[in-house]
Image (cartoon, grey):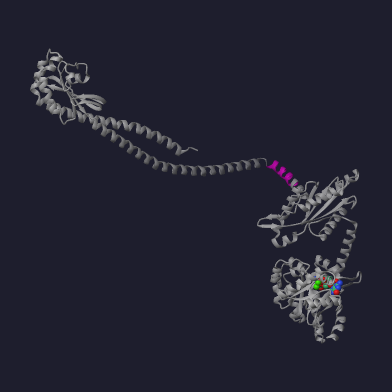
């Protein structure tokens, strides 16, 4: 755009220079003229004085000079008289030379005798004076000789003044030379000041105008910006309108292309996952079918890698579906970026991804890719403010060894993935046939488990807990038993994990609590008072926000005193629950007790333990077994006892089988013992028989 400021600066500069160039000389010229006029009028006045005072000798000299030569004149007595008078008159004036020329153009008198006799006809000033006009001539930086000697670098003004005779005719010419140096110096000084003043005024003007111009420039720029955007909008509108017109023009054609586009979009959607843009299940299956046909013909091997995120459900539950979706997109991007050797990557749905590797030569090749998939999760995922650490489990199945059809291969890869997860998160596993047997067994057991509660196949057994010192019964732990008509007696270590995975643990856990409380209260009525009963709690139960409410209902319904009920939790249970401390506080609020089960096998820090509202620690059976055999175990027990002592926890030792173990624990100060030494878990009737008599 036009740069107003720059334009202004340049033009102003030129104008200032021009103005200075014109104004300076003009001022000088005017001043010189003024000086000339002033000095001339002085000269005229002086000439008048000379004329009046020296009329006589002058007239004589003029007449007497006719026909005489210079030497004669110089010698003549009139000149001598004149010189004295002139010298007297010149004193204290600025005049430095006086000269009188005759009508005929010869100098008849001069304050400088050397000039007498000089010819003046050719001098313009003389000729003008002879014509009756007074004129002056300024000489600058001149050298001059006067009475008082030589003057160098002086400024002088010479005036030619006609001397009029009685009848008005010009009789001769006065040449008066005046020293105007002081005037000229004055002029020089004022010229400097004027220049400085002019410059200052111009500069000030320049600055002020520059400010105005700059402001104007800004306004112009703003307006141009506005104009530009208006023009852009207009252009867009014109474009849009043109497009619209084109569209209406080619509507028919457009409809056809639209339909085609819609078709291809539908086609795309049919084969792609809209969230991640990866191939979808259908696409994967079709590709796998084709690959299987080719591989069978050409005797190739194939690998299918089933990828499942380990913590996706937690992310979705705690951070919401929005973040969950973002995470899936990020995972898809990372897998496509970091895992290059696969021939197809697809998302099956949820947090399940699947890879296809064609023309596989050996298992090692597949293992490397599986490792790469696991490694892709090493770096955390950054989504907004969240940094999420995830891991994935990978299951692998191979064609032709692990199946000949799409369904078989995918199912077996899935089974292998479950095995990988069971081994520990962030692992991969190849499929083996026994996995299917295990999986089938699991499915069968799960189905049986689902019906077991309705079919009343469960019972609660009780295992005594006794006082270390007195051997008296202080409580019992409720342990679940499942007698299945199909499977026979199934131990909790087999079915509890299954119940947890399938969610059956929720109604089952509630049932155990209710049944245990009911049993204890029934015994109460029958005169057998069990002081305390402990019930194991699964993480799945604790996770449920409604759990404290359910527990309170059970207490109300059975009439159980809350102080006689204790819940057993493992450290891992606490780690798995979001706000474990808060949840436990709520349970404590109901008045029930809390025990930390399998103590010593987890990783709880001391500072964490201190915060928990727990009253009892249960030393894990594995340490008790080591008593008398393993000094390390004994040391751990000693440390746990000290820790419990300092934190004020009561300690129960689990799995006490021998008198030796009991003695050691008694010595360590352990308050309660639980184990086969005092009795295993038995059904309520037997328990009562054994302990009612005893107490
Ligand atoms: P746990 O809570 O550590 O229970 C103690 C386990 O050790 C019981 O096994 C018990 O029979 C066994 N035991 C007791 N004394 C001795 C002994 O002196 N020597 C040996 N070798 N073992 C002894 P059980 O009944 O098979 O229970 C296994 C696990 O199943 C329990 O471990 C508990 O975690 C879980 N479980 C049992 N019942 C329930 C239940 O109602 N709910 C939940 N959530 N889990 C339960
Ligand atoms: Ca327990
Ligand atoms: Ca235990």
The part of the image, by quadrant, that contains residue 240 is top right
Who's the residue at 82% across and 78% down the image? 663
Q: Is residue 659 visible?
A: yes
Residue 648: % across, % down: 71, 76
In the picture shown, does residue 281 fall above or below 552? above
Q: Which residues are magenta?
A: 251-263
- The overriding secondary structure of the stretch rendered in magenta is helix
Residue 651: % across, % down: 77, 76
The part of the image, by quadrant, that contains residue 383 is bottom right
Whether the magenta-drawn stretch holds residue 260 is answered as: yes
Looking at the rendering, the quadrant in which ligand 1 lies is bottom right
Residue farthest along the left direction in this orientation: 56
Whether the magenta-drawn stretch holds residue 307 is answered as: no
Residue 547: % across, % down: 74, 72
User: How many numbered circles does the render carry?
Assistant: 0
Is residue 547 left or right of 68 when viewed as pictured?
A: right
In the picture shown, does residue 198 fall above or below 148? below
Q: Is residue 508 visible?
A: no
- Give the camera-side residue of 137 and 556: 137
- Give the camera-side residue of 384 and 278: 384
Who's the residue at 90% across and 46% down the image? 296
In the picture shown, does residue 133 fall above or below 663? above
């Amino acid at each position: 755009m036009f740069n107003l400021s720059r334009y202004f600066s340049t033009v102003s500069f030129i104008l200032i220079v021009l103005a200075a160039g014109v104004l300076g000389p003009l001022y000088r010229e005017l001043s010189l003229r003024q000086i000339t006029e002033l000095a001339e009028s002085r000269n005229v006045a002086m000439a008048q004085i000379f004329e009046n005072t020296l009329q006589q000798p002058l007239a004589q000299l003029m007449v007497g000079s006719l026909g005489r030569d210079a030497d004669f004149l110089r010698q003549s007595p009139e000149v001598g008289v004149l010189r004295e008078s002139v010298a007297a008159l010149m004193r204290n004036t600025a005049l430095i030379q006086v000269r009188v020329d005759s009508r005929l153009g010869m100098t008849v008198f001069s304050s400088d005798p050397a000039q007498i006799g000089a010819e003046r006809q050719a001098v313009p000033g003389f000729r003008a004076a002879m014509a009756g006009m007074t004129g002056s001539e300024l000489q600058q930086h001149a050298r001059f000789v006067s009475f008082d000697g030589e003057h160098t670098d002086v400024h002088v003004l010479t005036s030619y003044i006609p001397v009029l005779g009685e009848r008005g005719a010009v009789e001769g010419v006065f040449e008066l030379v005046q020293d105007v140096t002081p005037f000229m110096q004055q002029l020089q000084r004022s010229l400097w000041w004027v220049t400085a003043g002019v410059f200052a005024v111009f500069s000030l003007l320049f600055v002020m105008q520059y400010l105005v111009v700059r402001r104007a420039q800004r306004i112009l720029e703003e307006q141009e910006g506005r104009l530009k955007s208006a023009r852009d909008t207009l252009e867009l509108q014109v474009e849009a309108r043109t497009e619209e017109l084109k569209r209406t023009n080619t509507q028919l054609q457009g409809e056809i292309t639209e339909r085609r586009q819609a078709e291809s979009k539908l086609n795309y959607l049919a084969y792609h996952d809209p969230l991640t843009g990866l191939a979808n299940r259908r696409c994967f299956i079709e590709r796998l079918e084709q690959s299987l046909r080719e591989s069978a013909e050409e005797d190739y091997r194939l690998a299918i890698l089933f990828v499942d995120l380990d913590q996706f459900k937690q992310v979705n539950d705690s951070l919401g579906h929005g973040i969950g979706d973002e995470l899936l997109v990020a995972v898809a991007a990372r897998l496509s970026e970091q895992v290059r050797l696969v021939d197809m990557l697809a998302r099956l749905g949820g947090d399940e991804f699947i890879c296809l590797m064609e023309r596989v030569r050996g298992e090692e090749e597949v293992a490397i890719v599986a490792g790469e998939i696991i490694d892709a999760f090493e770096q955390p995922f950054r989504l907004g403010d969240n940094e999420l650490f995830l891991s994935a489990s990978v299951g692998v199945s191979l064609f032709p060894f692990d199946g000949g059809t799409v369904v078989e291969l995918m199912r077996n890869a899935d089974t292998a993935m479950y095995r990988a997860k069971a081994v520990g998160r962030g692992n991969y596993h190849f499929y083996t046939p026994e996995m299917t047997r295990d999986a089938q067994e699991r499915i069968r057991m799960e189905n049986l488990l689902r019906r077991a509660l309705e079919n009343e196949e469960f019972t609660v057994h009780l295992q005594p807990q006794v006082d270390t010192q007195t051997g008296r019964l202080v409580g019992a732990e409720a342990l679940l038993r499942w007698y299945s008509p199909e499977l026979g007696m199934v131990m909790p270590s087999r079915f509890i994990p299954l119940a947890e995975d399938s969610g059956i643990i929720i109604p089952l856990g509630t049932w155990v609590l209710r049944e245990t409380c009911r049993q204890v209260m029934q015994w109460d009525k029958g005169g057998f008072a069990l002081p305390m009963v402990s019930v194991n709690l699964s993480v799945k139960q604790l996770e449920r926000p409604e759990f404290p409410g359910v527990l309170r209902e059970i207490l109300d319904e059975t009439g159980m005193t809350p102080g006689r009920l204790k819940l057993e939790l493992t450290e891992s249970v606490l780690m798995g629950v979001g706000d474990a401390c808060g949840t436990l506080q709520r349970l404590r609020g109901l008045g029930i007790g809390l025990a930390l089960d399998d103590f010593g096998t987890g990783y709880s820090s001391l500072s964490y333990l201190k915060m928990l509202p727990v009253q009892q620690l249960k030393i894990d059976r594995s340490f008790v077994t080591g008593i008398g055999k393993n000094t390390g175990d004994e040391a751990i027990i000693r440390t746990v006892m000290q820790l419990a002592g300092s934190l004020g926890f009561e300690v129960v030792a689990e799995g006490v089988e021998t008198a030796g173990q009991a003695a050691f624990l008694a010595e360590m100060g352990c308050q309660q013992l639980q184990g086969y030494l005092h009795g295993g878990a038995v059904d309520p009737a037997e328990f009562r028989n054994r302990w009612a008599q005893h107490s």
